[in-house]
Amino acid sequence: MENRHAKRVSIFVIGLSLVLMFALILPGSGYAQFKEGQKNTVPDGQEAKIKGVILTRDGETFVVRDITRTDTVVALTETTKIRTERKGLFRGHKPFDVTALIPGLILAAKGKGDAQGRLVAEDITFSEADLKAAITSYAQTAPVAKNLSETDKKLAETSQEVLETNKRISNLDQYDLVKTVTVLFKVNSDKLGNEQKAQLDELAAKAPGAKNYVVEVKGYTDPTGDFNKNLLLSQNRARSVVQYLAVKHNIPLRRIEVPMGYGETKPVNKGETAAAREKSRRVEVSVLVNKALNK
């Protein structure tokens, strides 16, 4: 039973890594690349609830498209609750942080409008099945089952459109680079040393001065050892960086794109020397500003 569960976890981690390797080369994607939809303005102070698919995400906001192709800008705050409802043996709600909000995810959001016509989210919910579908759809499009409601079918089709569009535009140069650092780690370690913390301190000092900034965090390992273990190690390294930036420098998680571990998939070079392996045990951290929003 334990081996079977471990295999499922490994498959899920591999799927997550391979998908986001393509989807998150740059955080988010240009809203202008999607077919234009109607714009939904939520009156200031009015309660509202929407269900749809995330088109794009930029730091503290993301755009949700519903089945009528109406687009709503959703704003995140420190008090926004993000959770998923689980079925089966482990019922109830499971909390998630904002890094789960990736393009293609079907969700429901409720809150109140603000002066800019955005929906300030108080509560965001989605199913674990929809999260996994958004993650794995690059490799295999989530099937639109016959027993789905018409609404869910349309949302699944929109999700597929979002994922396919993100694949086409993920390499476009839509962001200005404010600052980047490469943090190196010791063998089999995800712990930050004083030198690594100093690098992150310098990067964090640049972030608040950048309007509409987001932080991209990508973890890697050297090519030695077990592939699956390397995926987990690279993810833990990325999380260590995120935790330090959030706790030490109060950078909101909503400003940080999905912290991704790529394992051994992108070594600095193909050399087998000790120096080459050392450079591959790293986390790349970048502060980026969306060009369109920074004008």
Image (cartoon, helix red, strand yellow):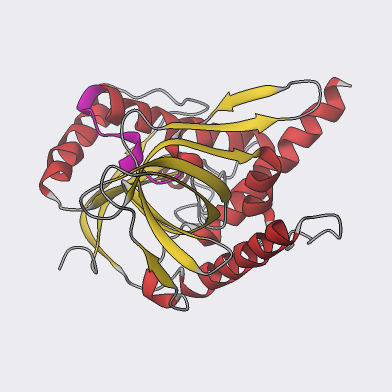
Q: Nearer the viewer, residue 269 or 86?
A: 86
* Residue 30 visible: no
Q: Looking at the image, is 108 positioned above or below residue 67?
A: above
Q: Quadrant of residue 198?
A: top left
* Residue 193 in the image, given as x and y percentages of width and height: 31, 23
User: Is residue 20 located in the magenta-colored stretch of the structure?
Assistant: no
* Residue 161 in the image, given as x and y percentages of width and height: 60, 70
| Residue range (magenta) | 248-258
The residue at 84%/21% (across/down) is 2
In this picture, residue 187 sits left or right of residue 128: left
User: Is residue 255 located in the magenta-colored stretch of the structure?
Assistant: yes
In this picture, residue 99 sits left or right of residue 2: left
The residue at 28%/55% (across/down) is 117
Q: Looking at the image, is 256 positioned above or below residue 213?
A: above
The total number of labels drawn is: 0
* Residue 84 visible: yes
Q: Nearer the viewer, residue 253 or 198?
A: 253
* Residue 103 in the image, given as x and y percentages of width and height: 51, 56
Q: Quadrant of residue 201?
A: top left
* Residue 207 in the image, given as x and y percentages of width and height: 17, 44
Q: Looking at the image, is 287 positioned above or below residue 23?
A: above
Residue pushed farthest left? 209
* Quadrant holding the C terminus: bottom left
* Quadrant holding the N terminus: top right
Q: Nearer the viewer, residue 239 or 157?
A: 157
In this picture, residue 48 sits left or right of residue 163: left
